[in-house]
Image (tube, coloured by chain):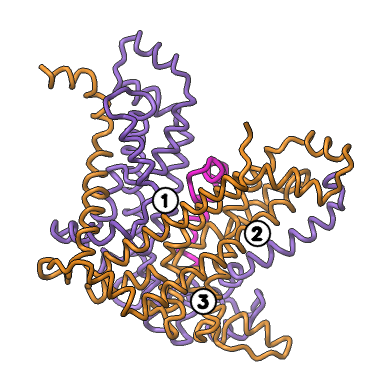
Amino acid sequence: MRMSSFLKKDGIGYLFLSPWIVGMLAFTIVPVAASLYLSFTDYEMFDSPVWNGTYNYVQIFTNDKQFWESLRVTLTYVFLGVPLELAFALLIALMLNKGLSGLRLYRALYYVPSLFGGSVAVALLWRQLFGAEGMVNGFLAYFGIEGISWIATPETALYTIIIMKVWQFGSPMIIFLAGLQQIPNDLYEAASIDGAGKVSQFLRVTVPLLTPIIFFNLIMQIISAFQAFTPAYIVSGGTGGPLNSTLFYTLYLYQKGFISFQMGYASALAWILLIMISIFTAIAFLSSKKWVHYEK
Amino acid sequence: MRGKASPLLRHGLNIVVTLLMIYPLLWMFSSSFKQPQHIFTDTGLWSDAFTLDNYILGWKGLTSVTFATFFKNSFVVSGLSIIGNLLSCSMAAYAFARLQFRLKTLLFGLMLLTMMLPHHVTMIPQYIIFNKLEWVNTFLPLIVPKFTATDGFFIFLMIQFIRNIPAELDQAATMDGCGAIQIYWRLILPLALPALVTTAIFTFIWTWNDFLGQILYLSDIKQYTVSLGLRTFLDSQGDSQWGRLFAMSTLSLVPVFAIFIFFQKYLIEGITSGGVKG
């Protein structure tokens, strides 16, 4: 009886939800649980996993130079790349906003790098641009400067990838632009009547009203930047070199899991990544109470 | 007062910055038509000796498998991913937006929670599962999850859209004797078309540009997608390869660019509606 009443009342909802439920179980919940379990095991893919407690985590934190290097690389990428990208995005959005003809064309052109940015093609192009005989050095030669191979020099390789990230500011720029267009003109008029200058209008009207969008962009970009993989893989030819200078965290995880097949160890790395992203997201949310203004 | 700060200056600035941004791509495009020995010496776009050789030689690939195979594979994977996402995400979105069932709030919360989950946490167990199923080195690990609504972003996008369709329409259809399935198929899907188009576009771009998923699961060169086909140029990088590499790289960007040109409106809407990262 209970079964038939269930089918009648809830059945149709669950029917529509059934593909999602299958996916949620098979591709999310079970893998998340399995990953957590594997992170406490020694598992090389070909034998069964062997429980070894917190050994992986202890190894990672106390005895793994590459882990710390990959952490440094990724944190540099996230906390240098994302703020720069968003600063450019906001600057260009302000430059485009309000009454500039050809806005749609400019917006489209600015978006093109974001459109292609994640592709293997662009990462390969970057290898050429910043290579020893690349286009960048070709331009420097006009000024009599002899450039180095920027991607083969440990001190500069990471920064070429950060430039690629900043280059893709078009996507957050479009979101800023949409936000700017929502700000009613009378607010500026009112501020102007009160004697506020351009700078003061920007700081007291534009920025506060834009903070929810800055916050949204910040969260989205931080989460995706932590997971960047393709540029690091292609620019370094899969190695993370030179001297681990482009060993992104995800690339290290990939090497551990799928090149040396230390899947227990790689699972522990994955959980550390998840916890790290969660902490930074939580910090952003907690701090948002102080600086994000929501209209009431 | 605002904006009066000389439109000329703003145009000038915008033109300079856009040109700077696009220049590397234009340069790659023009280099793909240059003789390999000219690519390094020319920082400019023009050449006296444009040629199609890079395309003809590049298309043949570095082994017996040509780029025709890689493009075909990429289109198969992207096409099936689109169908999967459209069907499964719209079904889930319809359930969450319109139907009543037990545990709905809980399940909806679960969906929101897992939307932010980094792929790397599930990557290894998923690989083990697909390996046990002997699906590794087929397209199945790339396609099957799409038929189970694993992209929460799109469900979310569609829920937002469906909620804006007046509920009176559903009630009228119910009066006319339509069941939930008919309402979904005949009423909701046609009215949610813009959200479906946005989903299709982003699924295409992401699948086409995907690299990590494809390098994990495809190891036989006959299964290679365009991303993996381009990767093979990494292994053999003599100077002569750059021309072919640029030719095939340029070709690889054409489908995404075409989508951008024809569906720009949906793309911009998708980005600004929030939730979809571009």
- In the rendering, what colour is chain B? purple
Q: Is residue A81 visible?
A: yes
Q: Element at badge 2? A: helix
Which residue was labeled with disc 2?
A87
Residue at figure coordinates x 38%, y 55% from the top left: B207
Bin the neighbour count of mark 3 within 10 Å (Cα to Cα): few under 14, some 14-19, many 20 and up.
Answer: many
Q: Which chain is disc 2 placed on?
A: A
Instruction: Give the label, 1 or 2, closer to the camera.
Output: 2
Colour orange maps to chain: A
Q: Element at badge 3? A: helix
Question: Is B59 drawn above or below residue B258 in the view shown?
Answer: below
Q: Earlier in the sequence, mark 3 or mark 2?
A: 2
Amino acid found under the numbered disc labelled 2: Ala
Which residue was labeled with disc 1?
B204
Q: Element at badge 1? A: helix
Amino acid found under the numbered disc labelled 3: Leu
Marking on residue A158: 3
Q: Which residues are magenta?
A: B249-278
Dominant secondary structure of the residues highlighted in magenta in the image: helix
Point out residue A268 in the picture as x, y percentages from the top left corner.
28, 65
Question: Is A12 drawn above or below residue A205 in the view shown?
Answer: above
Marking on residue A281: none
Point out residue A74 in the picture as x, y percentages from the top left corner.
46, 69
